[in-house]
Image: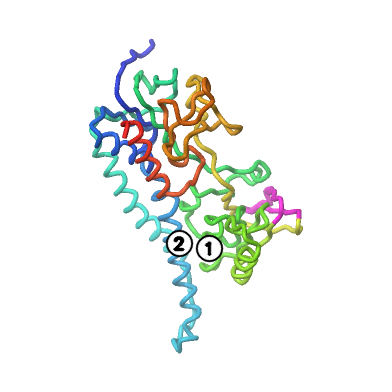
Amino acid sequence: MTAAVTERRCDVAIIGAGTAGLHAYKAAVAAGLDTLLIEKGPGGSTCTRDGCMPSKLLIAAGRTAHLARGAAEFGIGVASVAVDGPAVLARMRRIRDFFVQSILDDYHAIPDDRLVHAEASFDGPGTLVAGDTRIVARQVVIAVGASPAVPPPLKPAGDLVHTHETIFEIADLPRRMAVVGAGPQGMELAQAFSRLGVVVTVLDHSKAVGHLKDPEAAAAAAEAFADAFELHLGVDVSAEPAGSGEATVRWTGDSEGEATVDCILVSAGQKPQLDALNLASTGLTLDDHGTPTFDHRTRRCGDAASFNAGDAAIFIAGDANAWRPVLHEAARGGRTAGNGAAGE
């Protein structure tokens, strides 16, 4: 028997309760609009759960170990530095969870009649279906976030492949790790794990670390990390199981080689979580990756009928729009979208 469908009308419907979605919600509510927040999962931000917060806690642990090893330079005797992997990771998760809870407190403080717990999809430009609720909204904000991408050549390694969504849940530090992706996140975690005693190899198709464009700066950055871990740029990477909880990682290109590892951390970018939204029904213009075109100043999407960005009743903010995927930009983009939906 088909469940009854409830229709709900509102001024603004926001899809996603991460950083961008929560800021959009607050902006729209502050403007006095009848606002609904739709979230299919637990809510909360990528930054606190599996991004900035846990990575910085690992960086702090690695830095402490690194400074202890160099204490003799200051006349301070340290016989040896022993890293307790499970204890390091448990501390990281304990403090990380404190930050996560502070975000969830904001989410759970939202009145029940303004929340819809379900996955949403469009059924027209201003109509959404979320579970057994049909929502008709004057304005919609898409803030569904993004998920990490794993290149197909690495997938044969199976459970040994981690992304930022899973690496912080491991029980102990790996012995040998390959980090695929020499962007800011990959490099900071590579250094942190290396300082904690993990043998790290960093690999990237790009020829520069940290997305640096200046050749001299890129060369200096690569040199600065040379003592911390092995770094191979301008390479293509593949992996396959090697038995006994290990994988063989191979690279070809500007250099060639292989390494046996027990963990592969992929930091190769993210893909907006737009597939389930049925964006084809909205009439929006989509780019080659299926992301709506939008005005970077207002976060308002374009309308396929006019082929102009910035004239639809749909906004997109945060990692969902694949533009500047960092916390403060998600927060600012969410506020901008919420204010735009309010006509401000």
Q: Are marks 2 and 1 in contact (CB under 8 Å)?
A: yes
Residue 249 covered by magenta stretch: yes
* For residue 208, above or below residue 70: above
Q: What residue is shown at x 34% (from left), y 37% (from top)?
A: 24
Q: Residues within 10 Å of mark 2 (few under 14, many from 20)?
A: many
Magenta span dominant secondary structure = strand
Q: Quadrant of residue 341?
A: top left
Indicate the amino acid at tag 2: Leu
Residue 22 covered by magenta stretch: no
Which numbered marker is on residue 59?
none
Which numbered marker is on residue 58?
2
Query: As drawn, which residue projects farthest toward the bottom?
Result: 75
Q: Nearer the viewer, residue 234 or 53?
A: 234
Q: Nearer the viewer, residue 179 or 188?
A: 188
Q: What residue is shown at x 24% (from left), y 37% (from top)?
A: 30
Magenta highlight range = 234-253
* For residue 103, above or below residue 55: above
Tally of numbered discs: 2
Residue 87's spot in the image, x, y percent? 42, 63
Residue that mark 1 sits on? 193
Mark 2 or 1, nearer chain start: 2
Indicate left or right for 72 with 242 as reference.
left
Residue 249's spot in the image, x, y percent? 69, 53
Indicate the amino acid at tag 1: Phe
Residue 66's spot in the image, x, y percent? 49, 73
Q: Nearer the viewer, residue 113 or 193?
A: 113
Query: As drawn, which residue projects farthest toward the top?
Result: 1
Q: What residue is shown at x 30% (from left), y 29% (from top)?
A: 36
